[in-house]
Structure formats: C-alpha cells, structure tokens
Amino acid sequence: MLSVTDLAKSYGQGDARVALFEGVSFDVAAGEAVALTGESGSGKSTLLHLCAGLDLPDAGQVRIGGRDLAALSERGRAGLRRGQIGLVFQHFNLVPSLNAADNLAFQARLAGRHDPAHCADLMARLGLSGLGGRYPEQLSGGQQQRVAIGRALAARPGLILADEPTGNLDEATGDAVLDLLLDLVADTGAALLMVTHSERLATRLPRRLHLHSGRLG
C-alpha cells in the first residue's frame, strides 16, 4: 500500500543546509502495522508528512497504491489524501463547530463515501454511543482522540498515518486508544504507519522502523 524509495529531505540553504535524512526506503503492506521511532528532531513527523503528500521530498519517491505522489498536482495529492489516507494527529484537529458524529463523518463525506451505518458502527466500537451530539469542547481528551480515529477510518482508506496519536493522553487512556486503533485497522485491512516516541508503545506493533542519524535501522 505504501512504498518509499531512496527518500531524502533537507532544510535551509547553502552552508546552512541541514539534511534530515537520505536514502530512506521501506514498504508497508495492506493489513500491516508499523511503528516509526527515533529521537526528537530525527525527522519522524517530516517523514510521515512526506508519506501523506503534505510535503515533497528533495529526492526519492513515495507511492501509495502504486501512485507516485510527486507525479500528482497539489490538487491530485489532496484528492488522494481524501480517498486513500486516514490521518490521526496528536492534537486531535477536530472541527470545533461540528459535533462528534459530524466530525467522525467529515472525512467520509469529503471522499464521497459516507456510510451512516458504518459511521454508527465506528461510534459504537469507539465507545462513543450517546456522545454523537456533543462538541469537541464537551469531550475528554481520550474521547476526542477516539473521534479522530473514527474520522480517519470512516472513509475506509487503504492507509492510516498516525503522528503520536496518544501523545496528549495519560498512559491508561493512551493504551485503550491504541488498542482500539490496532483492532480497527486489523478489521479493515488498512496499512498503518504510526510515529511514536514511546518504546513501550512501539513494542505493541508487529514491526518497527527506527530513524537515527538520517537513516532507517
């Protein structure tokens, strides 16, 4: 589902140019869950953004479902994100003016694949039944992150990209949210690439990639 080949990314100009990483290659197959770890500043989130087509690399290639992101226009990449990628962020990024049910359905509506029965099932499985009418400010952090996970899965994407999805949660709530994410990804057959700084959480996933000194190990 996700194929990354010889990816390189740098920042700055001239003598101030700093290479984050280079020669990064890996694949994530459908149904596979992979943790991406590395020290702070190693480029984990940048690599995830490149995989989502939110930024473009200096060199190398990212392919999602066989499609080269660099060959698409910005509009084409946005369309691919809507239809093929589910994004989960550390800071939830829910729409304040939408209630929980509408936030969860938001991505599916954009993709033209809104299925009310599927969304209702996600709400139930995420422990959000009865909370659909509440707005983000009326939900706990754990509940907001569950809505965000449901939003990422509602359009049945082939790839889930999660950036520190439990980073703003206490340990017990974070563990419960990760359990739900892994269960739902397994059920849907989506590929999952999850950035985490936590060694403990990384061991919960079947496979790990570690970014260190600009290389994957």
Image (spheres, rainbow, N blue to C red):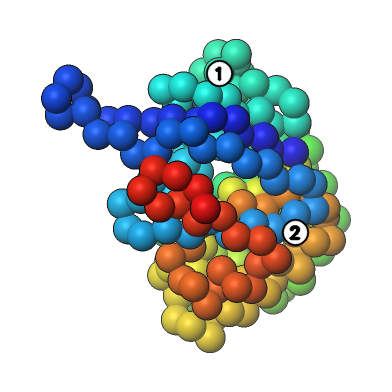
Marks 1 and 2, the one that precedes in the sequence: 1
Instruction: Report the amino acid beneath label 2.
Output: Val
The local secondary structure at tag 2 comes to: helix
Where's residue 149, x and y in %?
Answer: 62, 59
* 163 left or right, relative to 183: left
* 104 left or right, relative to 217: right
Residue under pointer 2? 185
- Please, which residue is most extreme toward the bottom here? 172
The local secondary structure at tag 1 comes to: helix
Where's residue 175, x and y in %?
Answer: 58, 79
The image shows residue 65, relative to residue 197, as above or below, that is above
The image shows residue 168, relative to residue 81, as above or below, that is below
Where's residue 72, x and y in %?
Answer: 60, 15
* 71 left or right, relative to 199: right
* 17 left or right, relative to 77: left
- Please, which residue is most extreme toward the left here? 15
Identified at 74% across, 38% down, the residue is: 1
The image shows residue 179, relative to residue 161, as above or below, that is below
Crowding near pointer 2: few (<14 within 10 Å), some, many (20+)? Answer: many
- Does the residue at mark 1 contact the one at mark 2 (Cβ under 8 Å)? no
Instruction: Report the amino acid beneath label 1.
Output: Ala
Residue under pointer 1? 70
Identified at 65% across, 49% down, the residue is: 160
3D distance between C-alphas at marks 1 and 2: 27 Å
